[in-house]
Image: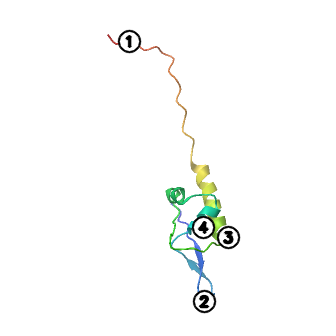
Amino acid sequence: MHHVKAQIRKPDNTGQRNGKGFSKGEVKKADLNTVNARKMGLPVDSRRRTVHDKNVEVIKAYAEKEKAKVKPKPKAVPSTKKEKPKS
């Protein structure tokens, strides 16, 4: 499974580092909720409060890729045979 990591700015503005997960705000801005994001395999860090647009785009792209993988369940076809009554 491909692991997706959130990018976080370092406090001294010298660059970015991998975070422990996406913030709830980033997940919400990507039109998901935290439960569905975790089911898809996205890490969610409830302690983070920042929202970075780059991370929102990463979440959206990952969600689209995951939705493409999910195949719809086949619909049940009603049986045409008549069942014999039990006696």
Please say if the residues under marks 3 and 1 sit with CB atoms less than 8 Å apart: no
Please say if the residues under marks 2 and 1 sit with CB atoms less than 8 Å apart: no
In the image, 34 versus 83, the foreground residue is: 34
Q: Nearer the viewer, mark 4 or mark 3?
A: 4
Going by the numbered disc 4, the residue's amino acid type is: Gly
Going by the numbered disc 1, the residue's amino acid type is: Pro
Judging by the rendered image, the residue that carries numbered circle 1 is 85
Judging by the rendered image, the residue that carries numbered circle 3 is 53
Please say if the residues under marks 4 and 2 sit with CB atoms less than 8 Å apart: no
Judging by the rendered image, the residue that carries numbered circle 4 is 25
Q: Secondary structure at mark 1?
A: loop
Q: Secondary structure at mark 2?
A: loop
Judging by the rendered image, the residue that carries numbered circle 2 is 12
Please say if the residues under marks 4 and 3 sit with CB atoms less than 8 Å apart: no
- The label shown at residue 20 is none
Instruction: Name which quarter of the figure residue 61 lies in.
Output: bottom right
Q: CA distance from mark 1 to mark 4?
A: 58 Å
Left or right of 38 in this view: 57: right
Among the two numbered marks 2 and 1 on one chain, the one whose residue lies closer to the N terminus: 2
Q: Residue furthest top?
A: 87
Among the two numbered marks 4 and 3 on one chain, the one whose residue lies closer to the N terminus: 4
Q: CA distance from mark 3 to mark 1?
A: 63 Å
